[in-house]
Image: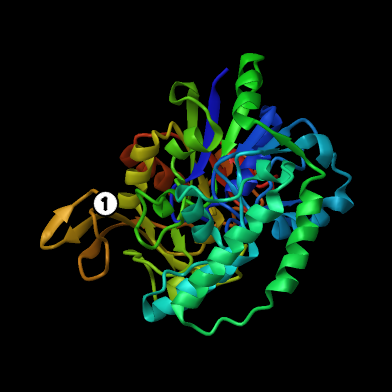
Amino acid sequence: MAVDLLLGLQWGDEGKGKIVDVLTQDYDIIARFQGGPNAGHTLEFDGIKHVLHTIPSGIFHKNAINVVGNGVVIDPVIFRKELEALEQFDLDIQTKLLISRKAHLILPTHRLLDAASETAKGKAKIGSTLKGIGPTYMDKTGRNGMRVGDLELGDWKEKYRALANKHESMISFYDVDIQYDLAELEAEFFASVASLKDLQFIDSEEYLYQAQKSGKKILAEGAQGSLLDIDFGTYPFVTSSNTTAAGACTGLGVAPNQIKDVKGIFKAYSTRVGSGPFPTELFDEVGETMGRVGNEFGATTGRPRRCGWLDLVALKYAVRINGVTELMMMKGDVLSGFDQLKICTAYHYKGKKIDHLPYNIEAENVTPIYTEMEGWQEDLTKMSEAQQLPKALNDYISFLEKELEVPIKIVSVGPDRKQTIYR
């Protein structure tokens, strides 16, 4: 039985959490494969809004097991708060949530290092969420990080102390004013580790192999977005893990030839949080309206998202490097009311017209070339069938399908799981 992937194709915040929640009824296992609590997956149903940061988005379904894979970095403090927020919903966490022993742990000093590094950059800061993600992945690749499996060993606190001491010396190197009380942070960390140890730790690659062998249906859930991939994103304004399809193989221990459907999610327009190039960004009333109507604030940070027209050059790039087999378009309802819509179909790049994503898309190098289309005025949020969608929206979708050469199977017309139209 093959593994399907679901991932974002822009700069994150595409709506992955909602779609995983919608699709979970068709799967036995939802497995998160990368990222950390810098992700914020928002789910809305039964009049309640939920925000998950590390726990897979299938957790509210009784039919599915949720696996936090080896490619994820876990902050025990944030993880405990997530668990506490779920207590009121009568979920069988003990049997439905499994954690890979090979997942790395975010220590309090990782967060402090993140803050020190970002502060030291001054105006050149990259817009880190300050959750300690980057420093944790640095320790992982530096081969001295702490993993979940270490918590089952008797000497894990000694390992913790050695790594925390190293971090403190690194913080002093940055020579910035970072105020903190490590004893207080550690007390909360150790209490949260105790809660984490109440959960099931697994050898996730073996677990998923046996699940495949027994015919279980598995959906791998990504975090952030393809344009934030450490290798293929808009570096250095990226996250610290591989957010693309290849990351599912290394983040879960799944062989490449076991990947079947790659479900790519994108917004009907573009957004990004934090710093970094954004060719189609709007600084006018149109961009302000997108942000206000779309409630474009980061689910993790609360920061307002920058908004702009759909960038088809970047989207094609993401479709190709991920091998996307089907698409899901989110927030079509946000574009209702605009008389004219624009889609970036090419760039002016260093005096030439190009239709691929170049090495550098900073504003001084890239000017978007737009195709204009008619907008629609209808309120989509009450629609439930594909035949109800207005002609202008269908024309918009058809144009995208022709350009991307991949079918758009789902159109989301609101945040609730019921506001999902299948095509």
x then y, percent, for residue 197: 78, 46
What's the amino acid at mark 1? Leu
In this rendering, does residue 288 appear at all? no
Q: Disc 1 designates what residue?
A: 357
Q: Nearer the viewer, residue 134 or 49?
A: 134
Residue at the spot x=45%, y=44% of the render?
394
Picture layout, residue 46 above or below residue 322: below
Classed neighbour count for the residue bearing mark 1: other residues with Cα under 10 Å, few (<14), some (14–19), many (≥20):
some
x then y, percent, for residue 4: 54, 29
Picture layout, residue 337 above or below residue 318: below
Total numbered labels? 1
20 left or right of 186? left
- The image quarter containing residue 108 is bottom right
Residue at the spot x=42%, y=69% of the render?
126
Q: Nearer the viewer, residue 229 or 172?
A: 172
x then y, percent, for residue 289: 51, 72
Picture layout, residue 326 above or below residue 279: above
